[in-house]
Image: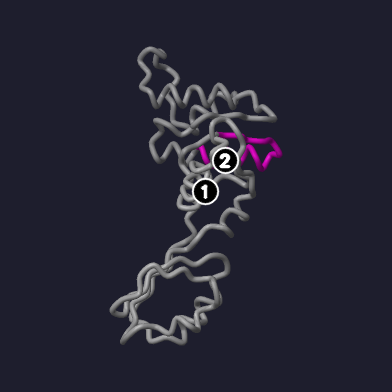
Amino acid sequence: MAEGERLAEVLDLELTKKIRQFSTGMKQKLGLILAMMHRPELLILDEPTSALDPLVRKSLFAELRSVTQQGRTVLFSSHSLNEVESLCDEVIVLRSGKVVEQQSIEALRDRALRKIQIRFDAGKPDLQVIPPTQMKVFHNENGDLAGTWPGDIKPLLRWIDQQPIEDVIIERPDLNDLFMSYYTELKSDPND
């Protein structure tokens, strides 16, 4: 089976229709197949998942992971940080055509904040024993505490274990929040 046919099968594209009968999603699949079928060493894709349904996206992600496992490089642009987080090893943030950030995905995750919500059984927590400067508290009333936590979560979990907790929610670090805060900081840059 030729590589183009294999990719058409992977991306669920019927090759018997005329292109003028293709939907936007079908045209996107065709463009991906044409870009990938020659197995280039460097694959550059601009918003490759636009107009693709979730199942086809999943197949495309698996295909792109396979490409990188073969030692080839994939460079793609995306406005979806969920895609970036699930696929990328390295992230470059562009603003007005200029590189404003280049980090490994792990370094970015380490900088991202976890959102924390805690409901205490009775009264307010002893905020004096929270590991210093790590937790930023936004709300602390009537036994409800909300804030953010950077980096290693183990000190927070040790502190929580010593408190009278009714409920706790700790969200994964969110790259979208990190990106938005970084972008907001950049907007105030007079050189931009």
User: Residue beneath label 1, please?
Assistant: 182
Q: Quadrant of residue 131?
A: bottom right
Q: Secondary structure at mark 1?
A: helix
Give the x, y percent position of residue 135.
49, 71
- Image: 63 above or below 122: above
Q: Secondary structure at mark 2?
A: strand
Q: Quadrant of the C terminus?
A: top right
**Mark 1 Cα-neighbour bin, 10 Å: few <14, some 14–19, many ≥20:** some
Say which of 31 and 17 sits in front.
31
Q: Is residue 72 visible?
A: yes
Say which of 86 and 57 sits in front.
86
* Image disc number at residue 87: none
* Range covered by the magenta-colored residues: 60-76
Residue name at image x 51 percent, y 47 percent? 185
Q: Is residue 82 visible?
A: no
**Mark 2 Cα-neighbour bin, 10 Å: few <14, some 14–19, many ≥20:** some
Mark-to-mark CA distance, 1 and 2 = 10 Å
Q: Quadrant of the N terminus?
A: top right
Counting residues from the N terminus, which is met first, the one under dot 1 or under dot 2? 2
Specify whether 176 is left or right of 101.
left
* Image disc number at residue 93: 2
Residue name at image x 62 percent, y 35 percent? 74
Give the x, y percent position of residue 2.
59, 23
- Image: 7 above or below 157: above
Label 1–label 2 contact, CB within 8 A: yes
Residue name at image x 52 percent, y 43 percent? 186
- Image: 131 above or below 7: below
Amino acid type at image mark 1: Tyr
